[in-house]
Amino acid sequence: MTTNNLSQTGDFLSVTRANEWHLEPFSFSLDNGTQVDVLDTGVIQFTPKNCGSKDIVLSSAVHGNETAPIEICDELIKGIIKGELSLSHRVLFIFGNPASINIEKRFVEENLNRLFCGAHKKGEQNNEKIRAAKLEAYVSQFFNAFSDKNRKRIHYDLHTAIRDSKNEKFAVYPFLNGKPWKKEELSFLLSCGVNTIMMMKSSATTFSYFSSSMFDADAFTIELGKVRPFGENDMSRFEKAKMTLTQLITHDTVNYPEFNFADFELFEVYRTINRTQQDFSFPFSDSAANFTGFAKGELLATDGDTDYFAEVDGEAIIFPNAKVALGQRALLTVIPLQNKTDFV
């Protein structure tokens, strides 16, 4: 697709899927003065003529089979390029793993969302590690474009979960290294239809943690539902998220409802269980939903000769995946958040 075609159709997703791992950069301007910079395949930056005070990264397709967020971002990009949406702030859109979109799988060789914060430097190189390094560089370049420390940096990494969840939509709040959680950010999530938040208690190698830890961005991994193929998503279930994201990028400021703890279900990570043996299994079925709770003493996982049992009543499972590579996280467990004083 030529630059002229993209400027007319806005179909950056098709350009991305036709160039799985690399695309030569090019730029053009919209009639409203917005600068469009295609930095690479799946990476497109918009700079309105009069920039507001926010630098916003919206990423999707870090796992290629998580299609609803891809469709949301595709619609937003088309709307911007075709002049249907007028931006108030700089926005960087990222389709993280185009090759995995095309094969309708989470990844090609390695889980891209375990390769940030320098994890891509470890071990034998592959396309996903090379891609993670590039995405880190593009985000760094985007956030470092202005030296003004008063600019608000935002990164929402949009996903859908492998399995159903008792709470259909939920978000992962990266570890903040002792800094308080922000009520305004939770109010934003609630406006997106997300009222369940999981507070992380340690560093990670995820895309959202990279932006949070390196650039003090307000960043989240946002799970908007369950994995489904293109064409099978009920997009009406994502309307709140799409509307709120649209307001975020097109309005100077957005006012959210007053924060109220009663509107949320807040959890904290209780522990992480890694797969260390080939013989790893869960006692529950593949249909067991995220946030399913277990009674104290119930079996949660078996890793070779090691059994893991629920240590407290109500210990709930998140992201169970017995097929992860050895050494990677196979399961998170959570409990209701105990301390609600660390909010501003």
Image: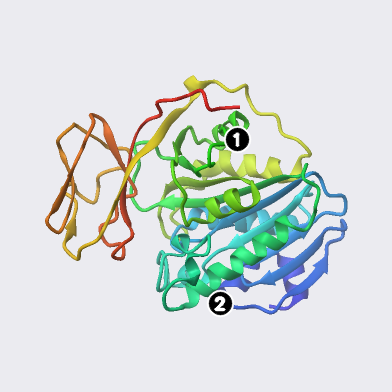
Q: Is residue 82 visible?
A: no
* Relative height, residue 112 to residue 18 (above, below): above
Amino acid type of the residue that numbered disc 1 sits on in the rendered structure? Glu
Q: Percent x, y for residue 322?
A: 25, 57
Q: Percent x, y for residue 68?
A: 50, 53
* Relative height, residue 186 to residue 30 (above, below): above
Q: Is residue 289 visible?
A: yes
Asked whether 62 or 295 is in front, the reply is: 295
Q: Percent x, y for residue 98?
A: 53, 70
* Relative height, residue 70 to residue 200 (above, below): below
* Furthest-front residue in this view: 178
Residue at the (65%, 28%) spot, across then down: 256
**Could you tell which of marks 1 and 2 lies nearer the N-terminus?**
2
Asked whether 232 or 180 is in front, the reply is: 180
The residue wearing badge 2 is 21
**Number of numbered labels in the structure image:** 2
Q: Secondary structure at mark 1?
A: helix
Asked whether 112 or 89 is in front, the reply is: 112
The residue wearing badge 1 is 185
Residue at the (80%, 57%) spot, across then down: 47
Q: Percent x, y for residue 197?
A: 46, 36
User: What's the image's color scheme?
Assistant: rainbow
Q: Secondary structure at mark 2?
A: loop
Query: Along the horizontal axis of the image, is 239 left or right of 301?
Result: right
